[in-house]
Amino acid sequence: MPREGRVVITGVATHWGTELAKSLERHPGVGQVIGIDSSPPEADLGRTEFVEADIRNPVISRLLPTLEPDVVVHCGILLYPEEGRPSRALHDINVIGTLQLLAACEKVDGLRALVVRGSAAIYGGSPSAPSFFTEDMARQYPLNTRFQRDIGELEGYFDNFARRHPAITCCMLRFQTEIGPGLENPLIRYLSLPVVPTQMGWDPRLQFLHATDATGALAAATLNPVRGAVNVAPDGAISLSRLLRLSGKPAVGIPPGISGLLIKRLGGMLGSADRYQDGQLLMKYGRGCDNRRLREEVGYELAFDAEGAARDFASKKSGVNRLFPAPHPGSPVRSVD
């Protein structure tokens, strides 16, 4: 990005939109940061200009061109229901909102890049899945859940936009589930239960992305976007059983006949009611993503591998709903310089 580049962030009031704005504010190559959302961010953003607007409203097609962005970063895709944004609104916000935003981007003269903060959930989970998905595998497996179909639909819109506008660098970031201190999502609430229910007979290998790397990768792709899909995932993977041992959490295996019903009920309790099927597949089969494009083309060097992210999470969560001390309390935790 040339010096004095202008970045517009949609969904700036979300956790990741706010974190991106903070990161870009500190970067000397970014001249102006403008955040769009239907409500103001809770954090105090220094030089980010806030514009109140709902991207689902067609008015965004008149507003966005007046902001004259060089880069648009779409952080408004919701992965879970939130306060004020219930599960029934996920489809409208994710699919309809993205469609309206793309229509607005078509009217922006001089737009050089569009970056979307998407989800690796598009790959789903199945017994025939590879150890690590590469970006070209998304269309090789069925979209089994409602959320997968929503992500697939919005990625279809994105791909069509990219084909029609080859002069714009369109980058779709497929994020693995984030983990880290200070985050609040259904996965973290699940791992914070006093006793963690697991699906009997299954020990999935998982990739949880450290929050530091989630923000770092998003900022790196904003400053150096590449064309097409990019997996945002750590190196390696960690089994669920090892993650629970690191966290000092006892697990109880649930027989297959009742695990689906229990997970559905847990989904309601943990705030992911409409995504319980995604969680069930993830905690049964796991999911790994290849991150070579992120490292080699975007140029982002991850601070934490999968086990390092789990260790850091376990060390920061010590004392929270813990029944037993974590093993190897003196084990080193990979840190960020």
Image (cartoon, rainbow, N blue to C red):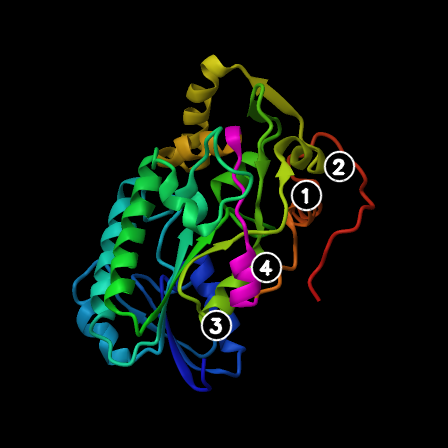
Q: Amino acid at mark 2?
A: Ala
Tell me which numbered mark, 3 or 4, is placed earlier along the sequence: 4
Can you identify the residue that label 1 sits on? 314
Q: Residues within 10 Å of mark 2 (few under 14, many from 20)?
A: some
Circle 1 — which element? helix
Instruction: Decide: is 84 above or below 171.
Output: above
Give the residue displayed 22% in from the left and 53% down from the top: 96
User: Mark 1: which amino acid?
Assistant: Ala
Can you see residue 192? no
| Front in this rendered view, residue 88 or 298 | 298
Do tag 1 and tag 2 residues touch (Cβ < 8 Å)? yes
| Residue 295 lies in the magenta-colored region | yes
Q: Is residue 328 left or right of residue 261?
A: right
Dot 3: what SS?
A: loop
Q: Is residue 222 left or right of residue 110?
A: right
The image quadrant that residue 81 belongs to is top left
Q: Which mark is residue 326?
A: 2
Q: Is residue 332 left or right of residue 192?
A: right
Q: Label 2's element?
A: loop
Q: Looking at the image, which is closer to me, 17 or 290?
A: 290
Place of residue 175 in the rendered image (x, y in percent of width and height, measured from the top left): 47, 52
Q: Residues within 10 Å of mark 1 (few under 14, many from 20)?
A: many
Q: Secondary structure at mark 4?
A: helix
- In primary-sequence order, the first of circles 3 and 2 is 3
Say which residue appears at 31% left-offset and 37% top-offset. Answer: 146
**Could you say which disc has been placed on residue 224 in the image?**
3
Residue 107, quarter of picture: bottom left
Among the two numbered marks 1 and 2 on one chain, the one whose residue lies closer to the N terminus: 1
- Point out the frontmost of discs 2 and 4: 4
